[in-house]
Amino acid sequence: MGRARHLPPLNAVRTFEAAARNGSFLKAAEELNVTPGAVSRLVKTLENHLDVPLFLRSHRAVALSEDGQRYAESITQALDIIDRATDELRMGSNANVLSLRCHPTFAVHWLLPRWARFHAGHPGIQIDLKTTLVPESLNMDAVDFVIRIDRNSAPEERHGFVSERLVDVESLPVCAPQLLRRVPLNRPEDLRNHVLLHGALRPHDWPRWLEAAGISGVPSAQGPTFESLTLAYNAALAGAGVAIGIRAFVADDLSAGRLIKPFDFVRLSKSGFNMVYSAERFQRFRKVRAFRDWLLQERVREKEGGAGEAAD
């Protein structure tokens, strides 16, 4: 029988390692999603347990003591080993299954039309796709990729996760051709004579487009609100009114002539759909590299005008 281990409080160890690695209680708190006070208390708990000062504290900063520096190096190595072992165990027989989470509208209008292209090029990788209305709140440690709304358009790495722009949010009015045969829409001011279709999760799209286009006198709140953009687009396809579309999501319908854009003006939002993934998993797993590279290829294809093509 092996000897019993005398381990310190593991939550305090994890917190100390984050503080040591970041060189700051504040940055450790941001990484762990707790308050700086909680970080300070847990580090103090560990110091009391060890009866060793791990940090030297001044009025405005903290710095590792010599003992703290040696302990941090060993603890970081140990946590890295646990992290890798956990990843490998979780992967298990699912080594070629890639987990992806995104909004339902993104899945329906952008990802699924391209699905066959990915599988044609990577038949050994299976995608575990689940949709959520709040991808921004997901725990990134539990999945390989999350596609969510983000403001940064340039690639950015933070706390070990990379965020890269995938799809810009470019909004424009769209409607069915038959609608204009009933009610003319020659200039944006004519929108006051039409039913405006809204998506509940994007209530500001119409007023922002009208403001950016310099249009006044059109009641932007008029018309029905649908649970999702998909329903609003379907209502537009049926000739029920004019929807405010995200260009990447209505590209196929525009290309096929099922929808038309009555005006050339497109509003570009500072926010867009970004793919977020672990920098470490990108280095370790071929499937993560393959999917990220494919997503970027699809972004280029879209920019070159291929977004409306059927999957081949």
Image (tube, rainbow, N blue to C red):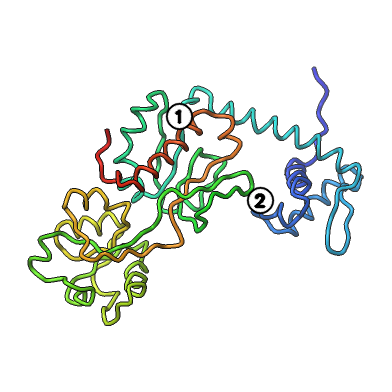
In this figure, which residue is indicated by the disc labeled 1? 97
Q: Is residue 147 above or below residue 74?
A: below
Residue at left 34%, top 46%?
Answer: 304
Classify residue 121 by image quadrant.
Answer: top left
Estimate the x, y position of residue 65 in percent, counting from the top left. Answer: 90, 47
Residue type pointed to by label 1 = Val
Badge 2 crowding class, 10 Å Cα cut-off, few under 14, some 14 to 19, many 20 or more, is some
Element assignment for label 2: helix
Tell which circle, 1 or 2, labels the residue nearer the N-terminal end.
Answer: 2
Q: Is residue 189 above or below residue 149?
A: below
Tag 1 near tag 2, CB within 8 Å: no
Q: Eyeballing the image, is 111 above or below 272?
A: above
Name the spot of residue 243 as percent of width and height, x first: 25, 63
Most distant residue in the top direction: 1
| Residue 283, horizontal then vertical, whole percent | 59, 32
**Of 3 and 16, the residue lying toward us:** 16
Relative placement, left or right, of 97 versus 255 is: right
